Amino acid sequence: MKKVRGKDMRNKLDVKYDHIKIENKYYDHWVKQGYFTAGDKSKQAFSMVIPPPNVTGKLHLGHAWDTTLQDIVARYKRLQGFDVLWVSGMDHAGIATQAKVDERLKEQGISRYDIGREKFLEHAWNWKHEYAKHIREQWATLGLSLDYTRERFTLDDGLSEAVKKVFVDLYNDGLIYQGERIINWDPDAQTALSNIEVIHKEIEGAMYTFVYEVVETGQKLHVATTRPETMFGDVCVVVHPDDKRYTDVVGLHVINPANGEKLPIITDDYIDVEFGTGVMKCTPAHDPNDFTIGEKYNLPKPICMNPDGTMNDLCGKYEGMDRFDCRKQLVEDIKAAGNLVEIKKHMHQVGHSERTDAVVEPYLSKQWFVKMRPLADEVLKNQEIEDEKIHFTPKRFEHTFHQWLEKIEDWCISRQLWWGHRIPAWYHKDTGEIYVGEEPPKDLDSWQQDEDVLDTWFSSALWPFSTLGWPHESDDYKRYYPNDTLVTGYDIIFFWVARMAFQARYCTDSRPFKDVLIHGLVRDDQGRKMSKSLGNGVDPMEVVEKHGCDAMRFFLTTNSTPGQDLRYIEEKVESSSNFINKIYNASKFVLMHLGDEFEVSNVDLTNASTIDKWILNRFNETLTNVTANMDKYEFALVGNELYSFIWDDFCSWYIELSKAELQSEDEAVKLAAKSTLLVVLEGILKMVHPFMPFVSEEIYLSLPHTQDSINLESWPTVIPTDISNTEMEEVKRLLSMVSAVREIKAAYKLKPSAEIDVIVNDSEGNIEEVNEFISSLLNQMCRANWIAQASAEEMVVRPIVQGSISVPLAALVNIDEEIERLKQEQSKLQQEIKRGEGMLANPNFVNKAPEAKVNAEKEKLEGYKSQFEIVTNRLNELQK
């Protein structure tokens, strides 16, 4: 039996809604009470993992959106009676965090090389603890219902064990290998990058064309490149075997204008005859396509740069120079020698490191790779099986997922960093033998462990199951895996979703989660991506302080459809705050009329009026639609349903209509109205709770309630009501009458309190008699008195449901004065139309003014013309 909270256990709502006071009140108590701790085995399990934020700084607005969507799902499922596990945790973020710690040490005048690996890692762990604490504080501010008892970190002992096992298993299965390949090299961080850690930016560079003189004949070949600094690594020049222009020089040699070395001329059908001069220099250690040619013909692969992006000892007098300084000086020297043909501006896509923004250098390096084709194929095969596939919302992103897996390349997983999972591989100091294992070799003194660490995404790819205790068959793993839902942005489908998919399939023979809800990026009000360079970023903590967490959450999650980007518009956040204020004030009205003595046990809908039954029926319709859309993750549709029902039906209509019943001398009528107000408001609070956890708790605890917190409540159910279609139509018609009268009063600038007479007509235009119920409510809601007699006077008519409503014009306005006013307005509009048409007929204005200004004038002109037509028609009516 449910316990009932007496009046002494209820909150007292403040006169004004104060988001700061309310939102600082509950979170710690919720966590302490264990409301977010999973483990009730009497319920059906539902699980999610948080996409672990990097321990590199503050959460941004994108994090707020992403985690709020997850929190909505978690809270909704708890209300539905599920045992919800939402795993909290953070990512060590290898490159990003190491760069931050390096920067902090640099400010102290220290280099990580000065203090060594172990001491550096102490600094990195201190950084982690500092920023993890900060992130937890932000999670609390956002109201996230995370299970902190199961918080994980990608470098904790359990996850490290999982990482080592997966590496060793993949290695033993021939799916991890060590190889020399062209990789993306970040010269600032001095580490390899995977393809998806490279951001391509279109920048203006140059195409340099040089003379390569044929040694044997003196013929001058023209060879173009965008990267002259790599010429010190050239091993040959290549032409197409069918290019007749160069048949006579194949097998001869040219002089490299950078260093005077002789290079052989070879052929390969990779060369595009139509591109440039049809002659290409080949630098196998600094270009992936050249590397392929080098492998094909067993060419040498000299590296001409140091890992920090400076030139090495192959480069003669340029040794030690930065690669871009070398480029500039080398071009000048080649020009001075008479071997520069031309320099053309050239727009091209240049790779930049996602973390350091350094220009990425294609670089020959020995690295560890995952052989991706077999892993990807296994995922693709299971995507054809309904009960095994990952379901994407929106569905179109499944195609994106498929495409990437179909075109996938081997994954470079080694990183030249200190912060991360050390690769579990050792090299014998004498024999060079490689040992790979979860535990170090027994005679450890004879072995040297690989210095590199694994790509951050290697450990986060295991997140859905490693966080639950895998590789052990833990209770949590058996109960909560696979996860039910993942919420993430479309920008990391490749980075993370695909990698979780193939690692889960390999490690657990399962999908990692059943559903993926994809959202977009948060952009500014102009649709631009938020960035430091534009200075248009928005701190979610500042939004919370100004407008409240609940308002921000409702805005973020109800203003964009799944998969679409979201524009941050502050006015809409303010609108969400106004909506919450509306709910708060409506709740105060309900509390005022319930009184201190009203309890849940007093609820009695036996004598519900037509108006009561109407709002109960509308509640049921709203609940059905909200539930269906919550299940489909269509939160924007949920927001529209809730806003319309709460603002319009409940606050604007029912509360006003209920006032007559609340003042009735019939106690049964009064009780039914109070009961209706309570059950509908309680249902509203449960539906908005996933979006607005704080204010829903504050109001719930002020009402007669049966639980210690709304967190312990159940999702609302349909309220039985026996309203007929005839009664529903009667209420709809009444509301349309009230709206029509209010519209007429507004149009003729009458005060809302002004009394007017109205005539109701049926759909055939006949005068209709209204009953006492309708008549009294018309008077109460809009001070309109129903009259039954026809009138010969001019009437103002407005349509209503199944008919129209008419008001004698003389009761609204002095007709002569109105005609004079309309003539003056007509004259002003004619002048504006003439001015607008003249401006738009002026070619100087149309051709020279900004396009936005011209369009604004066009819109104004159309508006004036539309107003002129309305005024003219009104004049014609009055002058008949």
Image (cartoon, rainbow, N blue to C red):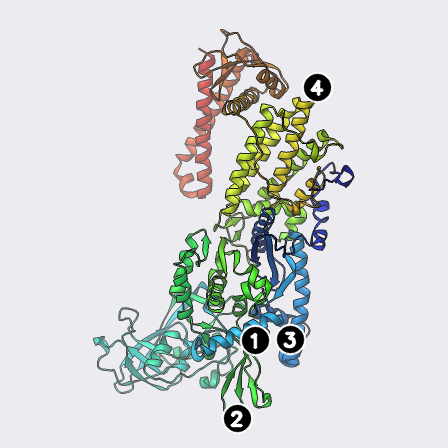
Q: Estimate the x, y position of residue 473 in percent, counting from the top left.
A: 56, 67
Image side of residue 231 versus residue 673, left or right: left
Q: Estimate the x, y position of residue 502 in percent, counting from the top left.
A: 46, 66
Residue under numbered circle 2: 430
x 42%, y 69%: residue: 375
Residue 777 sits in quarter: top right
Q: Which amino acid, by three-letter code, is at mark 3? A: Leu
Q: Estimate the x, y position of residue 214 in percent, counting from the top left.
A: 29, 83
Q: Nearer the viewer, mark 4 or mark 1?
A: 4
Q: Tag 1, which secondary structure?
A: loop
Precedes in sequence: disc 3 or disc 4: 3
Residue 85 sits in quarter: bottom right
Q: Tag 4, which secondary structure?
A: loop
Q: Nearer the viewer, mark 3 or mark 4?
A: 4
Q: Tag 3, which secondary structure?
A: helix
- Gap in angstroms between the C-alphas marked 3 and 2: 29 Å
Of residues 775 and 38, which is closer to you in this image? 38
Residue under numbered circle 3: 121
x 58%, y 54%: residue: 67
Residue under numbered circle 4: 665
Q: 370 above or below 712?
A: below
Q: Which amino acid, by three-letter code, is at mark 1? A: Leu
- Gap in angstroms between the C-alphas marked 4 and 2: 101 Å
Image side of residue 823 versus residue 161, left or right: left
Q: 610 above or below 603?
A: above
Residue 849 seen: no
Precedes in sequence: disc 3 or disc 2: 3
